[in-house]
Image (cartoon, grey):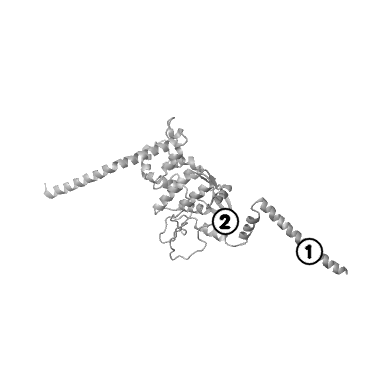
Amino acid sequence: MPKNMNQNHVITIDQEVETMKKQMKEAPKLLLKSADGVFLIELFRKVGKLVPAHQDDPIFKMAWISPFLMRDLLRIENQIPFFVLQKLYEVSKQEDHDCTLQSLILEFFNYMVDRPQEVLKKYANHDGKHLLDFFRKSFINNNRDSVTRSSVNRSSISRNLVVPEAIDKPNHSLKLIKPATKLVTAGVKFKANHQADSFLDIKFQDGLLLIPQINMDDFYSAFFLNCMAFEQCYFHCTKDITTYVVFMGCLMNTSADVSLLSHNKIIENYFGTDKEVAKFFNEVGKDVAFDIKNNYLKDLFVELNEYCKNGWHVNWAGFKHTYFASPWAAVSAFAAVMLLSLAVLQTLYTVISYYKKDGDK
């Protein structure tokens, strides 16, 4: 055999040996990920009743385990590539079942978020980078004009972070909005939108701010944190969850703002006190990179700020808030108006009487 050929074979074998060493080092990690993936597939199949669950299975028998498990599965550090889950599900899939993996996942998490079946069916064939990304996307309306990527050269705004603006013509109304209590004094009304498919579907029409109801609890707080971490780290995804958290953080600056939203059935508070809810949104939205000109609520920011500028509805709302905020204030205002009216009438009567006497003379 030629000498050069032997050397080539030796080089090839050495390369194969190095490759095998690297694969052996990665094998425990790959096996661990595969084991986690198998656990998830089996869990989703049992929840979807594709396979029977053991009668003493603690996941289904101990009520406190499921909420902890759901939050843990959505932690950004626990994510498995979605294509791995797809492959594992295809291997385990039985011919007599036509459920997709996506539909099983949505059914599993629906025990916490409670969405109608017609909403879940819209996302039964969607995809994602991993479990967190897929579940995050299931709240994003594909028909909505959502921003697909953030721009580095545009202005990024957070409560304490402002990046200088580029060449774009400034819009003075495109800025963060006032807290809920101040919006009310400017004439804005709040109403819970129970018909919305997602908590992201916020609308503003003729002074009425429609916000979908959300059950603020430990699950949603963990979900928001992990989604924002993913959106901040992954450049090629929408920033809708970040936008929502910043928006709600603007509305809920104090416990009084949270109380106002709770009174209007927008916030169902299972998280703690009103002060704790306000603190959560304020701390989560603090110093986060948020592009005020590149988000799905940018038009709503402009409309709200334009509406809150000086106008008759703002003055009238301020008058009502000052004099009719409580029954006692209303009674006091009514008494003041009556006294003023009686004083005017008395003055008119005195003047008329005076001129009438002069006429008789």
Q: Residues within 10 Å of mark 1 (few under 14, many from 20)?
A: few
Q: Which mark is residue 182?
A: 2
Q: Secondary structure at mark 1?
A: helix
In-image side of 324 versus 353 (left or right):
left
Q: Residues within 10 Å of mark 2 (few under 14, many from 20)?
A: some
- Residue 268 in the image: state x and y as whole percent: 54, 45
Q: Which mark is residue 348?
A: 1
Residue 121 visible from this viewpoint: no
- Residue 205 in the image: state x and y as whole percent: 57, 55
Q: Residue at x 45, y 38 (%)?
A: 66
Q: Residue at x 29, y 41 (%)?
A: 27
Which residue occupies the foreground of this view, 184 or 341?
341
Going from N to C along the chain, the mark reached first, 2 or 1, is: 2
Instruction: Tell me the distance, in whole angstroms, between the alpha carbons under discs 2 and 1.
Output: 41 Å
Name of the residue lying farthest toward the top: 55
Q: Amino acid at mark 2?
A: Lys
